[in-house]
Amino acid sequence: MEYRRLGSSGLQLSALSFGAWVTFGNRVGRSEARNLIALAYDRGINFFDNAETYAAGEAERVMGDVLADLRFPRDSWCVSSKVYFGAVRDPKPTQRGLSRKHVVEACHEALQRLRVDYLDLYFCHRPDPETPIEETVAAMDMLVRQGKVLYWGTSEWPADAIRTAHRIARANHLVAPQMEQPQYNLFHRERVEVEYAPLYRELGLGTTIWSPLSSGLLTGKYNDGIPAGSRMDTPGYEWLKRNLAEGEGPARIEKARKLAAIAREIGVPLSQLAIAWCLRNRNVSTVMLGATKPAQLEENLGALDVLAKLKDPDFARIEAAIA
């Protein structure tokens, strides 16, 4: 496993990490989750990502039970939560958003579900137009000073809002956000590569990127339709299926076919090729993987070996295929 600093911080995260979105508490039960986390840790993964909203809190409960059961030394791994959407199906106004009340209470609830004394990383899951950024920054600073959170950051915030949070923190001697969790893959690049480009040096921003396989599109499994039991066939995620059928979806399927042909010629699975492409960006602190089966996770972990194998002409062919 390779380890990378989380932006300008001293925290070393595994270049490949493991997340619970759409899997734990939905498609993956406790026994399967135990096998996946044990495998991930054995292969050097030290960061496990979660959020209050995943399966309405059940994903964190499953992950917390598994981590407690496996008894890995607490100082050898990191765990995260994210706050904004709430942990109930139909949240009341005070059960969602980035107010001081919800940020603090969601942290306490995540600590209980994950069965830990502190969160290594805590993300503001989306911007909150109803809450002043000053209030959110102050709430996060308080949690850090109380030892309940070590690093806080954002997820899918515009660059201007991240800059504003840093400006407020500097002006008031508060702890500033250290990382951002954006979507990043061969089909979704502009925010990481263009919008955030000045922030890596300017603010020391780290990134924990999600959906490196574009919700499975970059595995090739949707090239001929939607298989039963796949992520896009999961109840509650019909929007993923709509994205595949509408807008840029059909064009992306065609590009996925071209990429699959390149992967076959190189002799690697398309999934490994797509993850290796994400890893090539040194502004990516960690690439978050999702899996429902150990074999799937094993295959994706092979992306680090593929990255070492790929040459500049290979990446040029990839760029040409998605241009």
Image: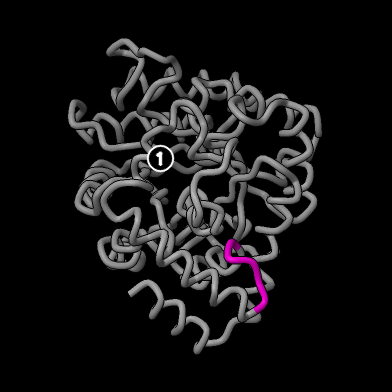
Is 101 placed above or below 73 here? above
Residue at 62% over, 26% down: 114
**Based on the displayed image, in which of its 4 quarters is residue 5 positioned?**
bottom right
Residue range highlighted in magenta: 267-271
Say if residue 144 shows up in the picture.
yes
Residue 156 in percent (x, y) is at 33, 46
Please identify the residue farthest to the top as the structure is shown.
92
For the residue pair 196 and 317, the one nearer the viewer reads as 317
Residue at position x 42%, y 64% in the image: 186
Which scheme is used to colour this image of the protein?
one colour
Determine whether, in the image, residue 296 is placed left or right of residue 320. right
Q: In the rendering, at what x and y percent does residue 215 appear?
A: 48, 48
Residue 49 lies in quadrant: top right
Residue positioned most to the front: 224
- Say which of 110 and 292 sits in front: 292
For this orientation, the residue located farthest to the bottom is 313
> Is 138 drawn above or below residue 221 in the view shown?
above
Magenta: predominant secondary structure element? loop
Q: How many marks?
A: 1
Classify residue 302 by image quadrant: bottom right
Foreground residue among 122 and 146: 122
Residue under the point 54% across and 77% down:
262
Q: Provide residue 209's location: percent of width, then percent of height.
A: 46, 53
Mark 1 residue type: Lys
Residue 208: tell me if it is visible.
no
Q: Position of residue 237 (x, y in %)?
A: 43, 32
As helix, strand or loop, the secondary structure at mark 1 comes to: helix
Q: Is residue 284 magenta?
A: no
Placement of the N terminus among the 4 image quadrants: bottom right
Residue to which mark 1 is pinned: 241
- Give the position of the C terminus as an image quadrant: bottom left
